[in-house]
Image (tube, rainbow, N blue to C red):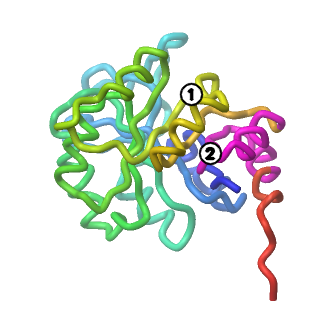
Amino acid sequence: MPDGVAHRAGNSTGALHAAIDAGVDWVEADIWWQYGRLEARHEHAIWRLPIRYDQWKLGVAVRRAPRLAEICRLTLGGPRLLIDLKGSVARLPIDIVKTLRAEGAVPRAAICGQVWPLLDAVAELEPGLQIFYSLESEQQLAAMRVRPAASLPITGVSCAEALLTADRLGWMRARDLTVFAWTVNDRARALELASLGVSGIISDNYEVLEAVRERRPRSRT
């Protein structure tokens, strides 16, 4: 049965503690490079101002965004850390790797994102990190299939669940790809994907993650 990944749980300390208490396998954090800081948040920022926005909302941040180093320390001895790279700043891979090394977190972290050159840069800097190339569209799925042979090999994908059919998952598994599915908030769909062989379920719903965990074979004593 797949691992359970708490979607965006690293973006606030409250959500992070809730995920740890829930016993998830991974927490996901959206990490931006913001003037030398590695901040966890989903929204865009405007310069150094405490203003945050995305496609649907604009507002003022009332709490300081957690830093990557803090998240590494809070998850020590607990869930693994899935870092979703946000933005396209060239310093982001360098500072991500530097921070993970400083915190001793490389063995328990993985990186995902839709800006594939940044993922390639991380892989070149730190081969010990697991990399998931994120797929949100049919175009990205097609690009993965024809990725040039000279590029770094893809060993893992983080894929929008709507793209994942039985045939596509069969194609991925035949190539030994580790597949995380996002964002799966429906219990039946999560269990279906688990039966098809995905390695991770990314969800906002802890009941969904618990349902997946309950299906794992129990170890014999």
- For the residues labelled 2 and 1, the Cα–Cα distance comes to 12 Å
Q: Which residue does the numbered mark 1 point to in the structure image? A: 160
Q: Which residues are magenta?
A: 188-211
Q: Is residue 185 above or below residue 46?
A: below
Left or right for 174, reference 97: right
Amino acid type of disc 1? Ala
Image location of residue 64, percent across then percent down = 43, 41
**Which residue position is annotated with label 2?**
198
Give percent across and percent down for residue 24.
Answer: 66, 57
Q: Give the residue type at disc 2.
A: Val
Tag 2: Cα neighbours inside 10 Å, few (<14), some, or many (≥20)? many
Q: What residue is rendered at 83% in x and 36% in y? A: 188
Most prominent secondary structure in the magenta stretch? helix
Work out whether 142 lies above or below 85.
above
Mark 2 vs mark 1: give the one in front: 2
Closest to the observer, 125 or 95: 125
